[in-house]
Image (cartoon, helix red, strand yellow):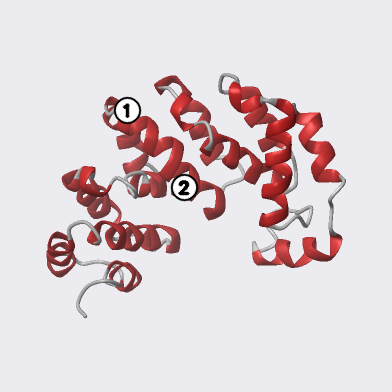
Amino acid sequence: MMAALKFHFENNRNEQNAGPMKKYMKDLFPFLGIKTPERTRLTKLFYQQSGILKQDFQHEFVLELWEQSEREYQYAAIDYISRSLTKLIKEDLPLFEKLITTKSWWDTVDMLAQKPIGTIAKKNPEVISETIEDWAYGEHLWLRRTAILFQLKYKEKTDEELLYRYIEGSSDSKEFFIQKAIGWSLREYSKTNPESVRGFIESHTLAPLSVREGSKYLFK
């Protein structure tokens, strides 16, 4: 599987694009220089040729993608995971914890939080007390961000008490990515329950960034 996708990606390297793409991501990761529309086309071609989407969820394929140097391979893994959400089970959670804590940056972590973690927790809510609770109060930046964001697309199914408790647990954080996650989660939930979010912001001490982000649709 890996060889087939790598064939498509390697044959479409673009060094002219690779430099600016790497710079945009703070020089943290090398890039092949394949922009999103072309990468989407190539992955779709790979899916058609390999039939992988008709098979069981492929852990090893995901890990192989994650081990590659260039960032497009991690994006391909995210795309494959996103197309396999109905196949995910509770026992897949350790895989995603590994991905969140490896080659970590917002571009992969945020999609993992919303999609596989959000999906598994919705189908298996016991993982919240078993695992996500530890993430929310642990020292790992990206796991903590994931705990704040995993309900991002839950809308009316959001566990409000849990969301607010996790936010309160990180409200004094000086980390930009935690403050941003708090604001983002509040902003998204405000689309469902604006009065609740307004009341929470007014009654809690949050970082200015969190307030600004969380209030985007409020206080107009």
Q: Residue at x 66, y 56 (%)?
A: 36
Kindly identify which residue carries mark 2: 142
Q: Which residue is drawn at 60% across and 20% down?
A: 55
Residue at the outermost front position: 48
Q: What residue type is labelled 1?
A: Lys
Image mark for residue 2: none
Number of marks drawn? 2
Of residue 207 and residue 219, the one placed in the foreground of this image is: 219
In x, y percent, where is residue 69? 75, 44
Q: Quadrant of the N terminus?
A: top right
Q: How crowded is mark 1: few (under 14 residues within 10 Å), some or many (20 or more)?
A: few
Q: Is residue 131 above or below residue 79?
A: above
- Marks 2/1 in contact by CB < 8 Å: the verdict is no
Secondary structure, mark 1, is helix
Q: Which residue is drawn at 62% across and 38% down?
A: 77
Secondary structure, mark 2, is helix
Kindly identify which residue carries mark 1: 123
Q: Is residue 127 visible?
A: no
Q: Which residue is drawn at 40% across and 22% down?
A: 90
In x, y percent, where is residue 56? 56, 19
Q: Is residue 48 left or right of residue 121?
A: right
- The answer to which image quadrant residue 28 occupies is bottom right
Of residue 70 and residue 3, the one placed in the foreground of this image is: 3
Residue at the outermost bottom position: 220
Q: Is residue 36 left or right of residue 199?
A: right
Q: Is residue 205 left or right of residue 118?
A: left
